[in-house]
Image (cartoon, grey):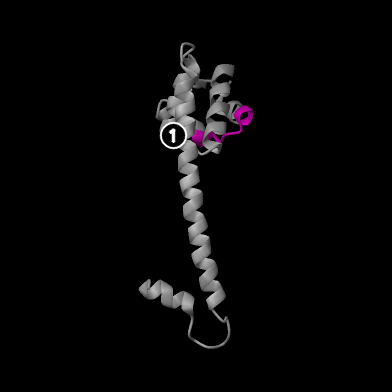
């Protein structure tokens, strides 16, 4: 199948599919005319990559997961280790975002939001104290 059909079946834009090919995540066959010829297995890998990226895995982590997926002698512990590491990273980001939200919420609460020029939000942004 051509890239347009692979795009439609996988739900990924053609540009993303070309990028994944450029960085070696997929390797479609080439027809006699030189055009990419995607097989069902390629579309399956593209869907795998889409779901992996949707869960927040980096391109390199996706590369590792795809290699493990293709390795029938893999240890599930290796897959779990990658997922647990990502979960720890997500938890850290949630804590950081929660702290940012608390800080911004305090600043919004401190600002009167009236016609006066003084504003605690701008003061905080200007000197960080």
Where residue 110 appears, as percent x and y from the top left, is: 53, 77
The residue wearing badge 1 is 59
**Residue 59, image quadrant:** top left
Q: Is residue 72 above or below residue 42?
A: above
Asked whether residue 125 is drawn in magenta, I would say no
Residue at point 50%, 22% (across, down): 36
The one nearer the camera, 97 or 44, is 97
Quadrant containing the C terminus is bottom left
Asked whether residue 14 is drawn in magenta, I would say yes
In the image, the segment drawn in magenta is 8-16
Q: Is residue 96 above or below residue 35?
A: below
Q: In this rendering, would 27 be left or right of 45?
A: left
The one nearer the camera, 103 or 69, is 103
Where residue 44 appears, as percent x and y from the top left, is: 58, 22
Residue at point 44%, 35% (across, down): 85
The one nearer the camera, 73 or 22, is 73
Q: Which element type, helix, strand or loop, lies under badge 1?
A: helix
Residue at point 49%, 81% (across, down): 119
The one nearer the camera, 125 or 42, is 125
**Predominant SS along the magenta part:** helix
Q: Dot 1, how many residues are within 10 Å of its Cα: few (below 14), some (14-19), or many (20+)?
A: some
Where residue 6 appears, as percent x and y from the top left, is: 58, 26
Q: Is residue 59 visible?
A: yes
Where residue 71 appears, as percent x and y from the top left, is: 46, 14
């Amino acid at each position: 199948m051509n890239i347009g059909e692979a795009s439609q079946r996988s739900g990924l834009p053609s540009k993303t599919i070309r990028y994944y090919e450029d960085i070696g995540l997929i390797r479609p066959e080439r027809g006699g005319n030189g055009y990419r010829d995607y097989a069902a297995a390629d579309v399956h890998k593209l869907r795998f990559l889409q779901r992996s990226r949707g869960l927040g895995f980096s391109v390199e982590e996706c590369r590792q997961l795809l290699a493990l997926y293709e390795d029938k002698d893999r240890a599930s512990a290796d897959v779990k280790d990658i997922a647990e590491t990502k979960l720890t990273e997500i938890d850290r980001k949630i804590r950081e975002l929660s702290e940012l939200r608390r800080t911004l919420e305090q600043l919004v609460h401190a600002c009167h939001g009236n016609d006066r020029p003084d504003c605690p939000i701008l003061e905080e942004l200007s000197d960080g104290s």
